[in-house]
């Protein structure tokens, strides 16, 4: 069963440029970002399959709990998600599909994808 509290969120600024740091402490942060919550169970499935390590190789920052990372080349994130979807459990595969959609959105906006925990 999925943990009710996400381990973090994958985020894309709605305006393409909003800095996550400016939104810290803002209880309405979601109005600034399109977001995909990253559930703890799916996170552990991705970690066990080496996907988090693949994310880390293309990230600026740290992809981990209580950390932040930026993916400046969303197409690379899409490629990792696409490749990994067939080899992870369904729950993690569904999360990867959502991350792919978010990364494609970032690419169309000329923006980054942010992981914030």
Image: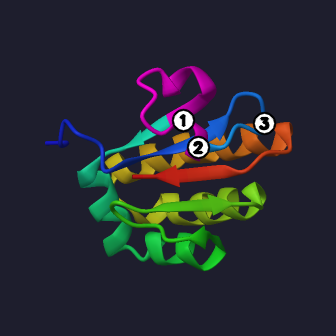
- Which residue lies at the image location 33% right of the left edge and 62% below the top edge? 65
Q: Which mark is residue 23?
A: 1
Q: Residue 36: where, in percent of width, then height?
A: 48, 37
Residues at circles 1 and 2 in contact by the CB criterion of under 8 Å: yes
Q: Residue 76: where, in percent of width, then height?
A: 72, 65
Task: Say whether residue 30 is left or right of residue 73.
Answer: left
Determine the CA span between mark 3 and mark 1: 14 Å
Secondary structure of residue under mark 3: loop
> How many numbered marks appear?
3
- Which of the two marks, 3 or 1, is nearer to us in this view? 1
- Which residue lies at the image location 43% right of the left edge and 66% below the top edge? 87
Determine the CA span between mark 3 and mark 2: 11 Å
Name which of mark 3 and mark 1 comes first in the sequence: 3
Residue under circle 2?
20
Q: Badge 3: few (under 14), some or many (20 or more) residues near its Cα, within 10 Å?
A: some
- Which of the two marks, 3 or 2, is nearer to us in this view? 2
Image-quadrant location for residue 12: top right
- Quarter of the image for the N terminus: give it: top left
Residue 108 vs 27, above or below: the answer is: below
Q: Residue 44 carries which label?
A: none
Task: Say whether residue 52 is left or right of residue 66.
Answer: right
In the depicted view, which residue is nearer to us: 84 or 104? Answer: 104
- Which residue lies at the image location 65% right of the left edge and 73% below the top edge? 58
Find out whether residue 23 is within the magenta segment: yes
- Please provide the residue range marked out in magenta: 20-35
- Which residue lies at the image location 62% right of the left edge and 47% below the top edge? 100
Residue under circle 3?
16
Secondary structure of residue under mark 2: helix
């Amino acid at each position: 069963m999925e943990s009710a509290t996400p381990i973090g969120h994958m985020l894309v600024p709605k305006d393409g440029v909003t800095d996550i740091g400016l939104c810290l402490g803002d209880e309405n942060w979601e109005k600034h970002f399109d977001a995909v919550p990253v559930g703890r169970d799916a996170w552990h499935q991705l970690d066990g399959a080496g996907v988090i390590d693949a994310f880390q190789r293309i990230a600026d920052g740290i992809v981990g709990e209580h950390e932040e990372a930026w993916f400046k080349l969303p197409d690379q994130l899409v490629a990792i998600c696409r490749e990994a979807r067939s080899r992870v459990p369904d729950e993690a595969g569904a999360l990867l599909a959502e991350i792919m959609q978010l990364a494609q959105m970032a690419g169309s906006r000329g923006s980054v994808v942010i992981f914030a925990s």
